[in-house]
Amino acid sequence: MVIDVGHERTLGTIELAMHQIFGVDYFITYFASNVIFELHKIKDENKDKNEYNVYYYIDEQLKLNISYVKFKKKIIKSVWTEKRINNFCFGNITLILHPNIYLLFYIFIISILLCIFILIIFKYCFRNKIKRNNHYKEYDEENKENDKEMELI
């Protein structure tokens, strides 16, 4: 398998995975670098089964030479099961797949809170205005009575 022309998304990811799984030295690849996995068949006349080795190269430098059986075991051991993936993504899968739903939800909640805030302010202002108007009415009524009394005198 040969993978090239990718760097950050492919080469870097493969290097990091190989470092974490097999302990291979990790370093930043340069422009036009490549990663090569080679599978070699080892012929042995004394054995009935064929054996295979995996060679891992970065820019023609051999970084790993391991038997295919060990390589496969370590890779499978590091691969997440469906259950582990679901546990990790629990609650986040909707956010990952449908980010606009959360954006609309946040906008809706903020607009409702804003409306409530505005209603509270209006209620407070109108309540004070009504109190002032009632106070003026009482004052006006007292003045009218006083004026009537003054007329009588």
Image (cartoon, rainbow, N blue to C red):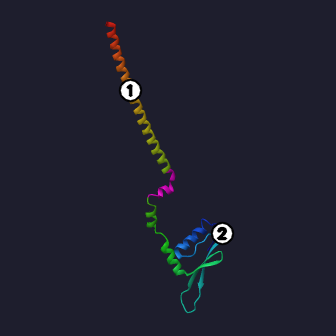
Residue range corresponding to the magenta coloring: 91-101
Position above or below: 145 against 55: above
Q: Which of marks 1 and 2 is in front?
A: 1
In the rendered view, does 98 fall on the left or right side of 148?
Answer: right
Camera-nearest residue between 48 and 87:
87
Q: How crowded is mark 2: few (under 14 residues within 10 Å), some or many (20 or more)?
A: few
In the rendered view, does 110 fall on the left or right side of 28?
Answer: left
Residue that mark 2 sits on = 30
Quarter that holds the C terminus: top left
Q: Magenta region's main secondary structure?
A: helix
**Residue 79: x percent and y percent?**
49, 71
Residue ID at (51%, 53%): 99
Marks 1/2: CA distance?
75 Å
Task: Kindly state the secondary structure of the residue where label 2 is placed.
Answer: loop
Residue ID at (65%, 72%): 34
> What residue type is disc 1 on?
Ile
Position above or below: 125 against 103: above
In the rendered view, does 52 fall on the left or right side of 32?
Answer: left
Residue ID at (47%, 56%): 94
Task: Kindly state the secondary structure of the residue where label 1 is placed.
Answer: helix
Q: Which of marks 1 and 2 is nearer the N terminus?
A: 2
> Label for residue 22?
none
Residue that mark 1 sits on = 130
Location of residue 27 by image quarter: bottom right
Camera-nearest residue between 124 and 18:
124
Q: Which residue lies furthest to the right in this view?
A: 32
